[in-house]
């Protein structure tokens, strides 16, 4: 069968829709505007359809165009995945594995899994991208990683739930919120500085899932900075409970006595962009991560003090960077 429309033409259509115009699409594809325009016009001519219609000064997708855009996007993604997979299959065990892991995931557990994987495959390089919110989804969608661990399921993707995280609001014991000496309300929190971690996505800006609209806010790029700032009495924050165990035990941080909602829970998922195209190394590393979580009884979402203390003893860098 001869295909009249090429992948390049479908890619041009997708770029025009997503970039918002021919000029923007040309910049995105690193091609001339005339080349992109010709590709889309030729597509319309070959299929005898109209993809865009003019409304005022803007070109909008027709009903047919909307359907073609969605199908074209799936087609191009499948082609890219097939090309990516062929490289892995040709190489056997991949020389490098790239994973994106949200910073709320227990670092010490991840390192235990890495250590075990390294004993099996010492020559495979690992690239870890420590991401926040949209940055994890972005890495998956753009195929910059083999798999990811995230607290949100990107649209159109499925994943295995591997960990239930508990988040608590905490501040230094001498923080003004603790000085109130009563159960705190949402309005109380909004009057004080909240520390949040910046979304690592390039194309999105979502500072935090648990931002309370506080009048004062400091946004940082890493959990260690947020923990250090809270310990210095510079604000309060919502932390994954396991990340501040040592600070809670030492008295540097203290849970805020909220009248309601003192704990929040969230699932974490292990997600492949397309498991069928994953290399044997990525599949094995994912399996080891699941096994490590099971061994430490974390799949129920309860991070015991015993596990945390054992991890701190094993880790050369405990404290503010658990």
Image (cartoon, helix red, strand yellow):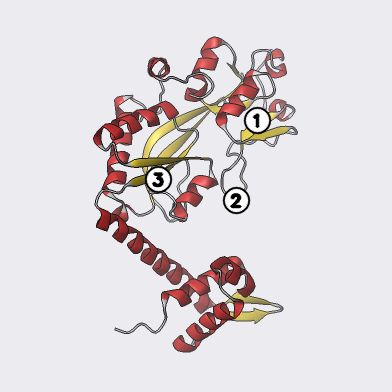
Alpha carbon distance from label 3 to label 2: 22 Å
Do callouts 3 and 2 mark residues in contact (Cβ within 8 Å)?
Answer: no
* Figure check: 81 above or below 211: below
- Compared with residue 21, is residue 275 higher up or lower down, i.e. above or below? above
> In terms of secondary structure, where does tag 3 sit?
strand
| Mark 1 neighbour density, 10 Å: few (under 14) some (14–19) many (20 or more) | many
Q: Earlier in the sequence, mark 3 or mark 1?
A: 3
Element on which disc 1 rests? strand
Residue 67 horizontal/vertical position (percent): 47, 73
Mark 2 vs 1: CB contact within 8 A: no
Residue pictured at 31% horizontal, 41% vertical: 124
What mark, if any, has residue 98 been given in the picture?
A: 3
Residue under label 1, please give it: 195
Residue 104 in the image, given as x and y percentages of width and height:
49, 33
Disc 2/disc 1 C-alpha distance (Å): 19 Å
Front-most of 208 and 321?
321
What residue sits 42% from the left and 74% below the top? 7
Mark yes or no: residue 159 visible: no
Q: Residue furthest front?
A: 123
Quadrant assignment for the N terminus: bottom left
Q: Nearer the viewer, residue 44 or 100?
A: 100
* Residue 129 makes an appearance in the image: yes
C-alpha gap between disc 3 and disc 1: 29 Å
The x, y position of residue 128, in whole percent, is 43, 40
Q: Secondary structure at mark 2?
A: loop
Q: Nearer the viewer, mark 3 or mark 2?
A: 3
Disc 2: which residue: 204
Q: Earlier in the sequence, mark 3 or mark 2?
A: 3
Closer to the chain start, of discs 2 and 1, is 1
41 left or right of 100?
Answer: right
């Amino acid at each position: 069968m001869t295909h009249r429309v090429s992948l390049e033409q479908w890619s041009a259509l997708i770029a025009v829709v997503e970039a918002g115009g021919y000029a923007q699409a040309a910049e995105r594809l690193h091609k001339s505007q005339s080349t992109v325009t010709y590709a889309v016009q030729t597509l319309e001519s070959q299929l005898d359809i109209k993809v865009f219609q003019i409304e005022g000064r803007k070109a909008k997708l027709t009903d047919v165009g909307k359907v073609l855009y969605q199908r074209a996007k799936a087609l191009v993604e499948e082609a890219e995945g097939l090309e990516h997979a062929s490289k892995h299959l040709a190489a056997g065990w991949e020389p490098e594995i790239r994973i994106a892991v949200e910073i709320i995931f227990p670092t010490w557990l991840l390192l235990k899994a890495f250590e075990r994987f390294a004993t099996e495959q010492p020559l495979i390089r690992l690239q870890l991208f420590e991401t926040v919110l949209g940055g994890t989804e972005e890495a998956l969608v753009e195929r910059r990683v083999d798999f990811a661990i995230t607290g949100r399921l990107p649209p159109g993707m499925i994943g295995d739930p591997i960990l239930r995280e508990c988040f608590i609001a905490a501040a230094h014991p001498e923080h003004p919120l603790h000085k109130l000496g009563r159960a705190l309300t949402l309005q109380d929190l909004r009057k004080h500085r909240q520390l949040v971690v910046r979304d690592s996505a390039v194309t999105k800006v979502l500072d935090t899932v648990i931002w309370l609209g506080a009048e004062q806010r400091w946004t940082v790029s890493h959990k260690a900075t947020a923990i250090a700032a809270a310990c210095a009495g510079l604000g309060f924050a919502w932390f994954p409970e396991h990340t501040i165990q040592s600070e809670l035990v030492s008295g540097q941080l203290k849970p805020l006595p909220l009248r309601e909602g003192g704990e929040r829970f969230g699932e974490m998922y292990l997600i492949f962009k397309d498991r069928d195209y994953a290399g044997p190394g990525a599949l094995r590393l994912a399996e080891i991560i699941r096994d490590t979580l099971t061994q430490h009884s974390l799949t129920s979402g309860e991070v015991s003090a015993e596990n945390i203390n054992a991890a701190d003893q094993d880790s050369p860098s405990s404290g503010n960077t658990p």
